Amino acid sequence: MNILILTGAGISAESGIPTFRDANGLWEGHPVEQVATPQGFARDPSLVHAFYNTRRRHLLSPDIRPNPAHIALAQWEQELLAPSADHPADDFLIVTQNIDDLHVQAGSRNVLPMHGELLKAQCLESGKVFAWRDDLTVDTPHPEAPEDDSKRGWLRPYVVWFGEVPLGLDRIEKAAARADLFLAIGTSGLVYPAAGIVQCTPPKCRKIEINLADTPTSPAFNEHRHGPAGIEVPKLIAELRSNSQ
Ligand code: OAD
């Protein structure tokens, strides 16, 4: 059975990471254009760095840990696939829109972070990606040439901004086209192309949405589980496990 799982901010909410869309359409007090577009970064890189620095520090604080939803998904993957097996055919794939690393912290192995990763930085010139846990500033030395002052400030957060192409789209499309089971967990169904993945799954695919409430993409799913991911995901996986025995 080929399983594809799409996760969004709602799966990390119970770990203490706020979801994106609050009542005013702001991200932690900032208009989206200011902190999540290439134009916003070009206009005020210090502000954008400060925004992601705050989020990176928060993610690295000891209080932020995977919750039962992340853990249940990781355990399920481990049960279904031998520990040493890799996933050449993406028969169990988590596509996450989240830039936190909570799926990986929980032990999930086949994770595709389509909107980038907060714990990475990217060179603006070469596109090379570096593991990154510190603050970034417009003066950050380049990791490959720390002595070269002309290369200071060449790093950007490795996150996909509005107007940029999400990562791994070919791979996601292929996994969707052969999925037998598709779960969408804690995502508002407002941001494309992620919100359109459900439409790329075949008619025979069982499609289940887990969210606190319905979303604009709910009609594309066969089943809906309303409730917090930390409760609904382990419950659903237990059900799927017992049905397959
Ligand atoms: P949103 O903040 O748009 O939506 C979060 C969804 O999770 C909502 O539908 C909530 O109802 C649901 N939710 C909240 N708490 C939940 C819980 N405990 N259990 C289950 N569901 C819960 O987040 P995303 O859909 O992830 O993109 O946003 C998609 C993209 O929009 C983000 O990846 C980001 C943003 O623009 C980029 O940065 C490119």
Image (cartoon, rainbow, N blue to C red):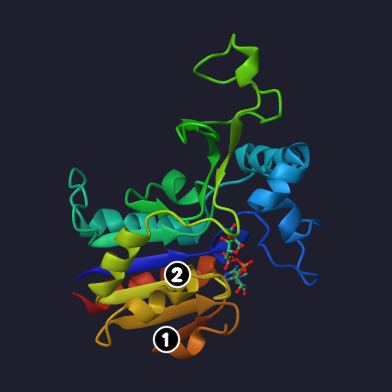
- Give left or right: position of 203 versus 20: left
Query: Compared with residue 132, is residue 40 higher up or lower down, i.e. above or below?
Result: below
Q: Quadrant of the N terminus?
A: bottom left
Does residue 179 show up? Answer: no
Q: Quadrant of the C terminus?
A: bottom left
The percent position of residue 37, horizontal first and vertical second, equals: 66, 54
The percent position of residue 235, horizontal first and vertical second, equals: 42, 73
Ligand 1 occupies quarter: bottom right
Q: Residue at x 53, y 14 (%)?
A: 145
Which numbered disc flags the more N-terminal residue, 2 or 1?
A: 1
Query: Compared with residue 95, is residue 232 higher up or lower down, i.e. above or below?
Result: below
Looking at the picture, which amino acid does disc 2 mark?
A: Val
Looking at the picture, which amino acid does disc 1 mark?
A: Phe
Q: Give the residue at the far top of this rendering.
A: 147
Neighbour class for label 1 at 10 Å: few (<14), some, many (≥20)?
A: some
Label 2 sits on residue: 233
Query: Compared with residue 115, is residue 229 higher up or lower down, i.e. above or below?
Result: below
Element under disc 2 = helix
Element under disc 1 = loop
The percent position of residue 149, horizontal first and vertical second, equals: 65, 13
Q: Residue at x 64, y 40 (%)?
A: 56
- Give left or right: position of 117 versus 135: left
- Foreground pick, 181 / 75: 181
- CA gap between label 2 and label 1 equals 16 Å
Q: Residue at x 38, y 66 (%)?
A: 5
The percent position of residue 39, horizontal first and vertical second, equals: 69, 51
Number of residue marks? 2
Label 1 sits on residue: 221
Q: Residue at x 64, y 21 (%)?
A: 152
Tags 2 and 1 in contact by the CB under 8 Å rule? no
